[in-house]
Image (tube, helix red, strand yellow):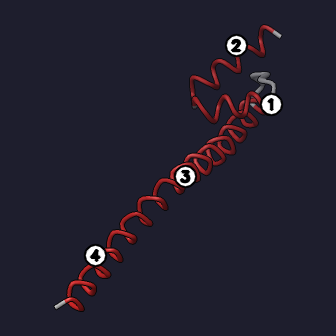
Amino acid sequence: MKYQYKEKMNILSFFIAVIVLIAILKFISLPFKIIIKLIINSFIGGIILYLCNLLGLGIIVEWWSILLTGFLGIPGLIISFIISILI
C-alpha cells in the first residue's frame, strides 16, 4: 500500500514538473518572439525607406528611422519623413 502511494506521488510530481517546465519555456520564448518580430519589421522598414529614397522622397536612412519604421510601420515612415524635412 505504501509503495502505491509513493508511485502515485512520483507520477504526480512528474506531471507538475512537466507543466512548470512548459510554463517556464513559454515565458522565456515570448521575448525571443518579440525580438525576432522587431528584427523582421526593422528589415522591412529599411527596405521601405530605401525604396522611398529611390523615389526621391529624401528620407534619411539611418538606424533610428529604420527602427521607427519597424516599430510603427506606415506612421513611423511618415514621422521619419517629417523629421527628415525638419532636419
Percent coordinates x, y for residue 13 in the rendering: 33, 74
Image quarter for residue 6? Answer: bottom left
SS class, disc 4:
helix
Mark 3 to mark 1 CA distance (whole Å): 26 Å
SS class, disc 3:
helix
Mark 1 to mark 2 CA distance (whole Å): 13 Å
Q: Which residue is mark 2?
A: 82
SS class, disc 1:
loop
Q: Answer whether labels 3 and 4 touch (C-beta < 8 Å).
A: no
The correct choice, above or below, for 31 with respect to 54 in the image is below
Nearest-to-viewer mark from 4 and 2: 4
For badge 2, the amino acid type reads: Ile
Mark 4 to mark 2 CA distance (whole Å): 61 Å
- Residue 61 bears which disc, if any? 1
Q: Which residue is mark 4?
A: 12
Which residue is found at the position 57% from the left and 27% from the top? 74
Percent coordinates x, y for residue 53 in the rendering: 77, 30
Q: Label 1 crowding class (10 Å Cα cut-off): few <14, some 14-19, many 20+?
A: some
- Residue 33 bears which disc, if any? 3
Nearest-to-viewer mark from 3 and 1: 3
Query: For this view, does 4 lie left or right of residue 18?
Result: left
Q: Answer whether labels 2 and 3 touch (C-beta < 8 Å).
A: no
Front residue (pair 21, 64): 21
Which residue is found at the position 83% from the left and 10% from the top? 87
For badge 4, the amino acid type reads: Leu
For badge 3, the amino acid type reads: Lys
Query: For this view, does 60 lie left or right of residue 40?
Result: right
Front residue (pair 27, 80): 27
